[in-house]
Image: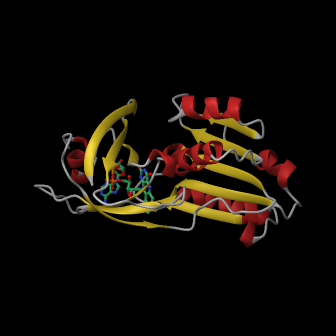
Amino acid sequence: MRLISKVQELEGVYSFVFQPDEKIIWTPGQYMHYTLEHPQTDTRGNERWFTISTAPYEKNIMITTRMAAKGGSSFKDALLNLQIGDEIDSNGPKGQFIIKEGDYNHILIAGGIGVTPYRSMMLQLNRDGKNLPIDLFYANRNEELVFSKVFSELESDLSNFTLKRFVGDNRIEKSDFVPYLGKTNSLFYISGPKAMVETYQRLLESLKVAEEQILTDYFPGYGA
Ligand SMILES: Cc1cc2nc3c(=O)[nH]c(=O)nc-3n(C[C@H](O)[C@H](O)[C@H](O)COP(=O)(O)OP(=O)(O)OC[C@H]3O[C@@H](n4cnc5c(N)ncnc54)[C@H](O)[C@@H]3O)c2cc1C
């Protein structure tokens, strides 16, 4: 794939848009595997996984990632240093973290940069005129939410979509899940750093949510 644009979303958060050299067909929520050869590769290596943050109708493949304030990898440095026209090797798409068809209430839970699959899902649903009942619980360390504008616009377009922001110490709590409990058509999706995903998975299980009602997608390599 060839880099066609690089956008700073927020401080330390960048999106990279690549044009594939052959058509890639994906379902929102899927990810790709990338290899980026670069000099002075650190022990973390030259391969990573990234969710496709673009919706299929947008055609190109976008990666959205957070750069570490310190101790960042050589891979991320190399990604940030890519120039328009530079290439990256990729394969995929892969993954089952996708919106399930059927009569469900969808509860999307995001921790920080874990919001990437939801941009793709929500934009494609809007494009397809599918106004599904969806609540996005978006937890972030500060008010600077990635794709905040996109989700606010989607809230105006889709009457059944609600964005619930959880900032700083205002964590997602047990009580926030109460309206969805005891219903077999509630589907919970959890995406974010591994520790966060495991915490909410355990919490939902302790609230007697069945295993098949919980879908997870965790991002290794980030702290909790
Ligand atoms: C299916 C899947 C989808 C994913 N999608 C996304 C996505 O959409 N966006 C995204 O940003 N990430 C995504 N990830 C995670 C991504 O692949 C990287 O693991 C993650 O971005 C961390 O990148 P990095 O290892 O280059 O570390 P950096 O981002 O450079 O650093 C992360 C932090 O962890 C510390 N750290 C981590 N590992 C080490 C180590 N071995 N040694 C020293 N310090 C370390 C760093 O010091 C820093 O504080 C996804 C992962 C998977 C499996």
State the image coordinates of residue 28 (x, y, percent, origin top left): 54, 55
Name the quarter showing ligand 1. bottom left
Most distant residue in the bottom direction: 211
Q: Quadrant of residue 20?
A: bottom left
Q: How many numbered marks appear?
A: 0
Q: Position of residue 105 (x, y in %)?
A: 79, 54
Can residue 172 be seen in this snapshot?
Answer: no
| Residue at x-position 18% and y-position 47% | 86
Across and down, in percent, residue 190 comes to 62, 56
Taking 152 as reference, is 82 left or right?
left
Q: Quadrant of the N terminus?
A: bottom left
Residue 6: image x %, image y %? Answer: 30, 37
Residue 135 found in image quarter: top right
State the residue at coordinates (75%, 48%): 132
- Quarter of image, res 209: bottom right
71 vs 170, left or right, is: left
In the image, taking residue 51 as reference, residue 173 lies left or right, namely: right
Residue furthest left as drawn: 39
Residue shown at 67% from the left, 43% from the top: 137
Name above or below for residue 143 compared with residue 121. above
State the residue in front, 143 or 52.
Answer: 52
| Left or right of 156 in this view: 25 | left
User: Can the viewer see residue 128 in this picture?
Assistant: yes
Viewer-proximal residue among 111 and 90: 90
